[in-house]
Amino acid sequence: MRIGTVGTNFVVRSFLDAARKAGAEIAAVYSRREETARAFAEANGVTRTCCDREAFLSDGALDAIYVASPNSEHFAWAYEALKHGRHVICEKPFVSTARELDELCALAKQKGLLLFEAITVPHLPNLKLIKEHLFEIGAPRLAQLNFSQYSSRYDAFLRGEVPNAFSPAFSGGALMDLGCYNLRFLLELFGEPEELRYFPNRAINGIDTSGVMVARYPGLVCTAASCKDSKSRNLIQIQGEKGYIVIPSVSSTLSEGFTVVTKEGEREYQAQSEENVLYYEMKAFVRAFEENDLAFRDALLEKSRAETRLIEAARLSAGIVFKADGV
């Protein structure tokens, strides 16, 4: 699987490492600026660079395009890559609106191409293990998630600058950046909630710098905090009628395993040894590419569609409007 990457930030560096470990080749780096592309490629052992978008997408030596552009540009990059016959791996949040994702899904299926959201949660071995042990605590009643990470760009935002991460024009904000992980975790464990609301702290430009999602299921209430304006001890706790589960890490990694506590005692579980958790998704994507597993693609896309639709509804109900909404 020969991949061309779009973007040069720290996430792309982690992706390169994970892709190589999973058996893929990073064949080219794209950036609008030649010096940026060259510097990134040299630092990360990639031999080819490109600054011409059409030439990059038309390169028949590339099997897939990995999109790590600003959130608002995900749709255009993914759509053009699919039109050029390339498989697509797109960073989370997949796109800005459910309408955009529906259009991408239709195009990928029409062309018989793979289309994946690069979100770690569904591929983590510890998630599978949590599912296996979930009902040892009886019927789940409460779940609490906290994903708080003081943004490296928040100080600039406070000074009056508007980084992409805090811009409605670029589909930024805490819900899109961190909340999508929390929601996907809930979707994987409990399915779609019957009610979802979002209570944000909004800046003067309307973007959410932090907030709490409340998801309600029959007999179960979940709260999920996502914060870019403050930090905290990150923790997930699931309470049931016969015990509870403690996960001392964020929903995007689950890297520290978890503990199941019941009246019989405490049992610790850990199924992950890879420090770079992007490896697990890339291992799955490379396998799907090698086997042309379109059923796997479709199953993941259905979850991504639910995730995108729910996030869009939650942010719009909270008054968070993006340029991509067209309103």
Image: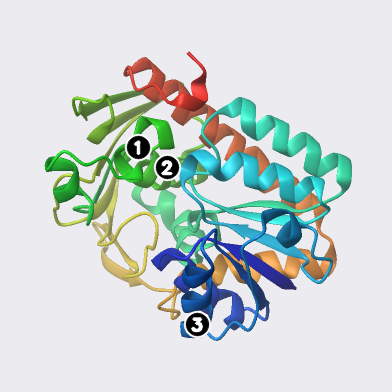
From the viewer's perspective, is 193 left or right of 115? left
Q: What residue did someone put label 3 on?
A: 44
* CA separation in Å, label 2 and label 1: 6 Å
For the residues labelled 3 and 1, the Cα–Cα distance comes to: 31 Å
**Which residue type does callout 2 highlight?**
Cys
Q: Name the residue that disc number 2 marks.
A: 180
Q: Amino acid at mark 3?
A: Asn
Quadrant of the image for the N terminus? bottom right
- Which is more foreground, mark 2 or mark 3? 3
Residue 220 horizontal/vertical position (percent):
35, 30
The residue depicted at 80 percent of the width and 45 percent of the height is 83
Q: CA distance from mark 2 to mark 3?
A: 28 Å
Determine the residue positioned at 31% across, 25% down.
198
In this view, the residue farthest toward the front is 34
User: Label for residue 305?
Assistant: none
Dot in front, 3 or 1: 3
* Residue 128 visible in image: yes
- Image quarter for residue 241? top left
**In the rendered structure, which disc, 2 or 1, sits on the residue that comes first in sequence?**
1
Front residue of 311 and 234: 311
- Residue kind at label 1, given as amino acid type: Leu
Mark 2 closeness class: few <14, some 14–19, many ≥20 residues within 10 Å: many
- In the image, what residue occupies the spot 80% across and 38% down? 107
Q: Position of residue 266 (x, y in %)?
A: 25, 66
Whether 269 is drawn above or below 151: the answer is below
